[in-house]
């Protein structure tokens, strides 16, 4: 196979080297295209454009393969826990017992928020979407923790990583408690990561609270499955914002905002809202699938389709199996789960979905598990944030450490008005 490609234009020839990845993915290196030919490329949504070389996560969308640092997601889902998987993503290797314990202890001892952060939660209306609070509070962490801040200082980066991993679950739980008018429950250093989060979410100061180990296990699985996904919208946002050399808190806060959208991490909330609509309406799943196909109807089937996967999302497969187990244990028969399975069957037997290779993605079944755990719908994207955080951190660090990193600044094709002179307001039509 050739290792270069030639572009002929206006009597000029540009020879583009073909770059090859670990799994034989190929890319045209066009870094000198404009200097050589005056041409730029045009690719809305970056469908055909690689923005970086990365060693963090590999996805094969045609085969439905997902690996973190080379380890198949199925093996990590079965054998790992979220803190170990976070260490793997951030540091590139599975930790030794000592490395893992140090990482775990560092995170445990950074879970508290400064007490003077609490008024920030009171400043929001009670019905504020918690994703707005997550983004604002994450950016605000840079003002409450200014002592380790410099994105060029390895020690500062390490402390900031511990603080983000440790404090975002506390921020999420405080946002939830604020929304239901309950007292904040502080982190307990005696608890492991997932149990600690569930305790802060569902305990009340008035009585002891026992975390259900099956709920903790299901949440750990979901956090692992959401931990990274190469250059998705929110990760690309973290990299782009981070490329200006702003602090990591600001870059992660930007990623949270990108993830909030219903086309991205907000889809898990959208799925359950749609299933509730189907349950409470006179329409059946077939009519919702028909709406999703109708170009005159803005409705798209939430939790279905993916920019990269043109096969079943391997995460959705694992989550569907877990949903079966967890939902029946926690709530028994869930009519929404039955509707979701029917919706999947109807869609996957419809040519429109088959031709476009639209399958359930990570968001299709995850919300049903969160709901069975007792979480409100608007907290579902927040759980996506907590899962994706180590991936964002790993990708941000790779960007900061990459000698090829330059500030992100795409070009454009201008198709606005040509040059024209200013017209005084009295002379305008
Ligand atoms: C996540 O990128 C990542 O890795 C993301 C993520 C991660 O872990 O970070 O995996 C997490 O964001 C998963 C996706 C969650 N979003 C949704 O479930 C929202 C519903 N899905 C769609 O909006 C859509 O599939 C996207 C946004 C996920 C992907 O959009 P693309 O790649 O731009 O695809 P497209 O919109 O160009 O669709 C191609 C065709 C179009 O039809 P035609 O123009 O060819 O006739 O497929 C159709 C679309 O209309 N289509 C759908 C559909 N998804 C695509 N039609 C109905 N329902 C859908 N869900």
Image (tube, rainbow, N blue to C red):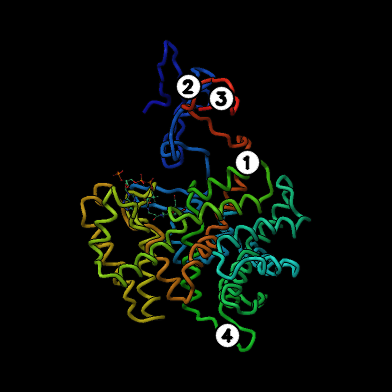
Q: CA distance from mark 3 to mark 2?
A: 40 Å
Q: Is residue 44 left or right of residue 128?
A: left
Q: Residues within 10 Å of mark 3 (few under 14, many from 20)?
A: few
- Mark number displayed over residue 190: none
Q: Earlier in the sequence, mark 2 or mark 1?
A: 2
Mark 2: few, some, or many residues within 10 Å (few <14, many ≥20)?
few
Q: Earlier in the sequence, mark 1 or mark 4?
A: 4
The disc label shown at residue 39, or none: 2
Residue named by callout 3: 427
Circles 3 and 2 in contact, beta carbons < 8 Å: no
The verdict on label 3 being within 8 Å of ligand 1 is no
Q: Residue furthest right?
A: 147
Dot 4 and dot 3 residues touching (CB under 8 Å): no
Q: Nearer the viewer, mark 3 or mark 2?
A: 3
Q: Secondary structure at mark 4?
A: loop
Q: Which label number is shown at residue 243?
A: 1
Q: Which residue is mark 4?
A: 209
Q: Nearer the viewer, mark 4 or mark 2?
A: 2
Q: Is residue 89 or residue 95 the one in the foreground?
A: 89
> Within 10 angstroms of label 4, few (less than 14), some, or many (20 or more) residues?
few
Crowd rating for badge 1 (residues with CA inside 10 Å; few <14, some 14–19, many 20+): some
Q: CA distance from mark 4 to mark 2?
A: 63 Å
Q: Viewer-nearest of labels 4 and 3? A: 3
Mark nearer the viewer, 3 or 1: 3
Mark 2–mark 1 distance (CA, rounded to whole Å): 24 Å
Mark 3 or 2, nearer chain start: 2
* Residue positioned 48% across, 72% down in the render: 376
Residue displayed at 66% across by 55% down: 139
Element at label 3: helix
Image quadrant in which the N terminus is located: top left
Q: Residue furthest front?
A: 426
């Amino acid at each position: 196979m050739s290792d270069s490609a030639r572009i002929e234009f206006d009597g000029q020839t540009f020879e583009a080297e073909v770059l090859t990845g670990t799994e034989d993915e190929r890319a045209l290196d066009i870094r000198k295209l404009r200097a050589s030919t005056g041409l730029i490329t045009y690719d809305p949504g970056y469908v055909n454009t690689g923005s970086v070389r990365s060693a963090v996560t590999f996805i094969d969308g045609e085969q439905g393969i997902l690996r973190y640092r080379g380890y198949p997601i199925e093996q990590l889902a079965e054998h790992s826990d979220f803190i170990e998987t976070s260490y793997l993503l951030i540091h590139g290797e599975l930790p030794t017992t000592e490395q893992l314990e140090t990482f775990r202890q560092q995170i445990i001892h950074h879970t508290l928020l400064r007490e003077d952060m609490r008024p920030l939660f009171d400043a929001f209306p009670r019905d504020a979407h918690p994703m707005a609070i997550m983004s604002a509070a994450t950016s605000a962490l840079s003002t409450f923790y200014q002592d380790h801040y410099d994105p060029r200082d390895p020690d500062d980066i390490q402390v900031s990583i511990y603080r983000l991993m440790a404090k975002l679950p506390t921020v999420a739980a405080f946002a939830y408690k604020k929304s239901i008018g309950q007292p904040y429950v502080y982190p307990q250093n005696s608890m492991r990561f997932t149990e600690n989060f569930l305790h802060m979410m569902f305990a009340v100061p008035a009585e002891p609270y026992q975390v259900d180990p099956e709920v903790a296990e299901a949440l750990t699985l979901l956090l692992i499955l959401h931990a990274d996904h190469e250059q998705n919208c929110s990760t690309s946002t973290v990299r782009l914002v981070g490329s200006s050399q702003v602090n990591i808190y600001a870059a992660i806060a930007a990623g949270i905002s990108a993830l909030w959208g219903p086309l991205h991490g907000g889809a898990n909330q959208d799925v359950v809202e749609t299933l509730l609509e189907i349950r409470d309406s006179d329409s059946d799943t077939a009519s919702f699938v028909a709406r999703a196909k109708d170009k005159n109807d803005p409705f798209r089937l939430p939790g279905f389709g993916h920019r990269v996967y043109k096969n079943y999302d391997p995460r959705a497969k694992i989550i569907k199996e877990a949903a079966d187990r967890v939902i029946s244990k926690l709530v028994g028969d869930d009519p929404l789960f039955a509707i979701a399975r029917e919706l999947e069957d109807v869609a996957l037997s419809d040519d429109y979905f088959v031709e476009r290779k639209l399958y359930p993605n990570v968001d299709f079944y995850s919300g049903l598990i969160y709901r069975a755990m007792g979480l409100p719908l608007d907290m579902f994207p927040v759980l996506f944030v907590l899962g994706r955080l180590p991936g964002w951190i790993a990708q941000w660090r790779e960007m900061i450490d990459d000698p090829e990193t330059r500030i992100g600044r795409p070009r454009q094709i201008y198709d606005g008005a040509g040059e024209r002179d200013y017209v005084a307001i009295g002379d305008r039509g």
